[in-house]
Amino acid sequence: MLASNITITLQRDAGQKLQVGVVNYYDGQAFAVTRKSAVTTLSALSGSAICMAAGTTHIANTTEWFQARGLKFTPVILDNKDLMYEAFFAGRCAAVTEDSSALAAAIVARANAAEYAQLPRSSRASRSAPTFAAATTAGWPWCAGRSTPCSRPRSLPSSRAMSTSR
């Protein structure tokens, strides 16, 4: 099971043989900057370097947003989120982008959290859910007896309904 905030996309849901559980929260891409930069809008980052993690939807989303407004930015794509935050906090980028909840958690964990601010959200909310390898879903009660991959339920059975099916 991938217990992380993973945005549900068609490729992840169908193309990679993953089973996506029930959506458990909505989040959205956000951007953080240093307060001393005085940047208060995403448009104000035009021409700036923005730190991003490789393999995320944030790269395409940010590129599309800036292109749609005739603005430019320099993507600084790092191999993983740890390196992304390390680069941002070291000053290699004017901003960093991540899902809002994860971005807030990374900033709050720092001793100097008050020196950073999230910009107002400029993207739509994305659906997030736990994700499983398709082979692990065979033991789920709603998948019992199926020879084909079990599709995700639209809602989980109630605990009462599950206890009577045992």
Image (cartoon, rainbow, N blue to C red):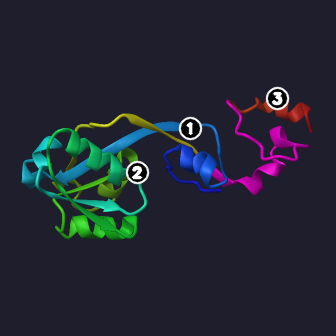
SS for dot 1: loop
Q: Determine which of the numbered discs, if any, sits on residue 66 in the image.
A: none
Range of the magenta residues?
130-154
Q: Residue at x 40, y 51 (%)?
A: 57
Q: Earlier in the sequence, mark 2 or mark 3?
A: 2
Crowding at mark 2 (Cα within 10 Å: few <14, some 14-19, many 20+): some
Q: Is residue 139 magenta?
A: yes
Give the residue pinned by disc 1: 24
Q: Residue at x 65, y 56 (%)?
A: 1
Give the foreground label among 1 and 3. Answer: 1
Locate residue 21 relative to residue 24 in the image: left or right. right
Locate residue 155 relative to residue 51 in the image: left or right. right
Inspect this view and state whether residue 97 appears: yes
- Measured along the vertical axis of the image, is residue 82 above or below residue 101? below
Q: Is residue 35 magenta?
A: no
Give the residue pinned by disc 3: 160
Q: Earlier in the sequence, mark 1 or mark 3?
A: 1
Quadrant where the C terminus sits is: top right
Crowding at mark 1 (Cα within 10 Å: few <14, some 14-19, many 20+): few
Three-letter residue code for mark 3: Arg
Q: How far across and how far down the image is residue 5, in percent?
A: 49, 49
Q: Residue at x 23, y 51 (%)?
A: 32
Q: How far across and how far down the image is residue 150, in percent?
A: 77, 43
Three-letter residue code for mark 2: Thr
Give the residue pinned by disc 2: 57
